[in-house]
Image (cartoon, helix red, strand yellow):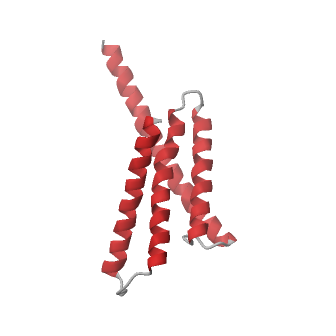
Amino acid sequence: MKTFLFRSMIGIFFGAFIAVLLTNSVVLFSEKDTLDGALFLKNSLGSVFCGWFFTVSPLYFENKKLLLWQQTILHFVTVVVLYFLLAFGIGWVPFNLSSFLLAMGLFLVVYLAFWICFYVYFKQQVKKLNDELELL
């Protein structure tokens, strides 16, 4: 529970940070003099929620009772469902088939890239630890 709360705080703060960066980018790099308050609030809360579930959902990978493929499927389904509910609800992704397929394809490519990078990194860490244990 302590880990869940800590990661929740990190995710909320990270999501809020992204929202501030995006808002500042819009103000600095566009011709807009004012921002729509309702749109700002909707996107900021979406960013905060997105930051939260992307930092909490990796807790599946710490459940030692599950195999890696089970952890991966649970994590993938969780983030896909939550992200697309949020993205369709807020309007980040238009609610039509072609937009969904394009966004899902992009999501899958990014997810696989991150998954492979983390897999390779942790596999190297295990090898390094095992090599150090053999020296003892």
Q: 101 or 87: which is nearer to us?
A: 87
Residue 71 vs residue 4, the one in the foreground? 4
> Is 126 situated above or below 85?
above
Residue 64 occupies quadrant: top right
Q: Residue shown at 45%/55% (left/top)? A: 51
Task: Decide: is 62 above or below 50.
Answer: above
Report which quarter residue 28 is drawn in. Answer: bottom left
Name the residue located 50 percent from the left edge and 64 percent from the top edge.
Answer: 46
Q: Residue at x 34, y 67 (%)?
A: 21
Q: Is residue 119 left or right of residue 128?
A: right
Q: Give the image location of residue 29, x and y in percent.
A: 33, 80
* Furthest residue in direction right, as rendered: 97
Is 65 situated above or below 81? above
Residue 67: percent from left, percent from top: 59, 31
Which quadrant of the rendered structure holds the C terminus?
top left
| Spot occupied by residue 47 in the image (x, y as percentages of width and height) | 46, 62
The reply, left or right, for residue 35 in relation to residue 42 is left
Q: How many marks?
A: 0
Residue 65: image location, x then y, percent? 59, 27
Snapshot quadrant of residue 109: bottom right
* Residue that sits furthest to the top in the current view: 136
Residue lying at 35% horizontally and 27% vertically, measured from the top left: 128
Image: 115 above or below 29: above
Which of the two residues, 7 or 81, is positioned nearer the viewer here? 7
